[in-house]
Image (spheres, rainbow, N blue to C red):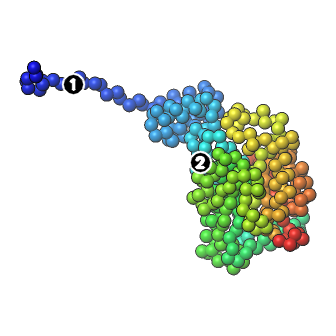
Amino acid sequence: MSSSPQIRSSFRPAQVATPRPASPPSHSTLVTTLRAAGCVFAEDEAELLLSTAQTPGQLAAMVKRRVAGLPLEHVLGWAEFHGLRIAVDPGVFVPRRRTEFLLGEAVALGLRARNRHLPCSCRSDRSSRVHPDHPDHPDRPSHPGHPGQPLIAVDLCCGSGAVGTALATELATELATGLATAPAADGPERVELYAADIDPAAARCARRNLTAVGGQVYEGDLFGALPTGLRGRIDILVANVPYVPTQEVGLLPAEAREYEPLVALDGGADGLDVLRRVTAAAPQWLAPGGHLLVETSERQAPQAVEAFARNGLLPRVATCDELYATVVIGTRPQDDGTGR
């Protein structure tokens, strides 16, 4: 027997209370949580987490990962480097602020291709430790570049591609500004950027960052990953090689030891294994007057300088006390007898 219309019309579904969306924790609560987990800059981290998370659930997951010890940059998915937001995937080396000094030196050398200089508040001991006849002495003319040809830059051991991205961005801006105000007949007018890393995750991450600046990323071991057509053509070669001695890797913060690739940290017995390989091959890849820039420690700088000189590069050391950064720079002589 069917129900009467009156009975059907009087039926109403039960009212289910809709849960109110969870509210995100307050800034002070988040700071307390992060500080209890050992985060030194808890206030700054709380602001970054709150501004990055799109939902309370996402924020809770991010806080959980950070409290567990993951690097903040891996939790956020990005790192700030030279004013740029650089994508940093889990398991990829996190760019350090001190490496901005390496970047600054590379930019300055790139601009010298147009006889321009980039002021730096950090100390670079060019005059005191470079012979007046050295091509990098500030009073000597710079490598002139090639009329109408691009400036070739390479980011070796690129990791996330932070250095290459910032280098291409800065040089492109400065070169464009220079061309608009004082066109140069003897210098490069654009930048071509190439990058390489042996870690597949790093290469994938670098492609995300370098695509925006027209860079090309290759996966492989040092120069073996690069197109052979770059031999003898590279003007600026930056290599943020691993330089932590093997026995000292265990002394690094847990964030680095546990969540960053060992290949990006461990530089061998004295920390200079990869640096030596780079300096040995660099002269065949650099253009005459081209520059190799490598970050190292102050303690390792004398040995690094020896490696540069032994392979025919004219070395100098630049340091920045503020960032506790040391960079060794080697220049391929304009005429080194290679015939390139």
Marks 1 and 2, Cα distance to the nearest angstrom? Answer: 49 Å
The C terminus lies in quadrant = bottom right
Kindly indicate the quadrant of the structure image that contains residue 334. Answer: bottom right
Per the image, the residue denoted by label 2 is 87
Viewer-nearest residue: 116 or 338: 338
Amino acid at the residue labelled 1:
Pro
Of labels 1 and 2, earlier in sequence is 1
Element type at mark 2 = strand
Q: Residue at x 58, y 32 (%)?
A: 65
Please give left or right for residue 297 compared with residue 152 in the image: right
Residue 43 x %, y %: 57, 35
Element under disc 1: loop
* Residue 71 appears in view: yes
> Circle 2: is it few (<14), some (14-19), or many (20+) Cα within 10 Å?
many
From the viewer's perspective, tell me whether residue 53 is left or right of residue 330: left
Looking at the picture, which amino acid does disc 2 mark? Ala
Marking on residue 199: none
Q: Quadrant of the N terminus?
A: top left
> Is 55 situated above or below 111?
above
Instruction: Identify the residue at image location x=63%, y=74%.
Output: 179
Q: Position of residue 23 (x, y in %)?
A: 42, 31
Looking at the image, is 30 positioned above or below residue 88?
above
- Any mark on residue 13, and which? 1
Q: Is residue 18 above or below residue 126?
A: above
**In the image, residue 252 lies at what x, y percent?**
75, 35
| 317 left or right of 184 in image | right
Q: Which tag is nearer the camera, tag 1 or tag 2?
A: 1
